[in-house]
């Protein structure tokens, strides 16, 4: 399920990175990432059954994640963890501004938006609902 469409991305979120032609691909990819990070709770409950605060937070996180995916698709699609050329090295993984959870790379500030919904809590299924 896609939690934000191009109309929301363009009109409400005011995004400028995605085009109308590419938006569905990245918004769907981002929606899957966000739902996986929330342990399937968004799909299981239904976005429309969540509070307005949670719905807006999820849509914002999806739009921000979609932009991140579009801008970094080449790096995200690589299977390398690190590489080095002539003494210069690059490593992929969690850092101060990137969070990696279950193989999903997401900017830390976007992950924080999702965390505040309570849907990423690893404890009891209905905690905070």
Image (cartoon, rainbow, N blue to C red):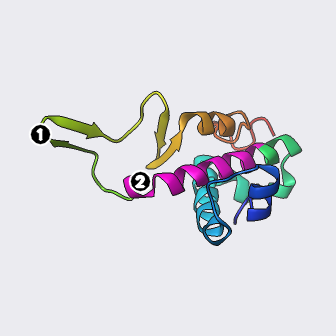
Helix, strand or loop status at disc 2: helix
Name the N-terminal-most of marks 1 and 2: 2
Residue drawn at x 67%, y 46% as measured from the top left? 61
Furthest residue to the left?
A: 86
Q: Quarter of the image holding residue 32?
A: bottom right
For mark 2, does the 10 Å Cα neighbourhood hold few (<14), some (14 to 19), or many (20 or more) residues? some
Helix, strand or loop status at disc 1: loop
Q: Which mark is residue 50?
A: none
On the question of residue 54 being in view, the answer is yes
Compared across the picture, whether 93 is left or right of 20 comes to left
129, above or below 33, in the image: above
Considering depth in this image, is 124 or 101 the residue closer to the camera? 101
Q: Which residue is mark 1?
A: 86
Please report the bounds of the magenta region as a residue range: 57-75
Furthest residue to the bottom?
A: 21
On the question of residue 36 being in view, the answer is no
Q: Which residue is mark 2?
A: 76
For mark 1, does the 10 Å Cα neighbourhood hold few (<14), some (14 to 19), or many (20 or more) residues? few
Dominant SS of magenta comes to helix
């Amino acid at each position: 399920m896609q939690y934000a469409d191009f109309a929301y991305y363009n009109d409400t979120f005011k995004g400028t990175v995605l085009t109308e032609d590419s938006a569905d691909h990245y918004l769907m990819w981002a929606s899957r990432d966000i739902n996986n990070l929330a342990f399937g709770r968004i799909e299981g409950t239904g976005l429309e059954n969540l509070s307005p605060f949670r719905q807006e937070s999820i849509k914002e996180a999806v739009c921000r994640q979609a932009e991140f995916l579009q801008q970094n698709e080449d790096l995200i699609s690589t299977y390398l963890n690190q590489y080095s050329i002539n003494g210069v090295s690059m490593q992929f993984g969690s850092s101060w501004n990137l969070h990696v959870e279950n193989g999903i790379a997401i900017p830390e500030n976007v992950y924080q938006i999702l965390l505040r919904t309570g849907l990423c809590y690893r404890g009891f299924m209905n905690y905070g609902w």
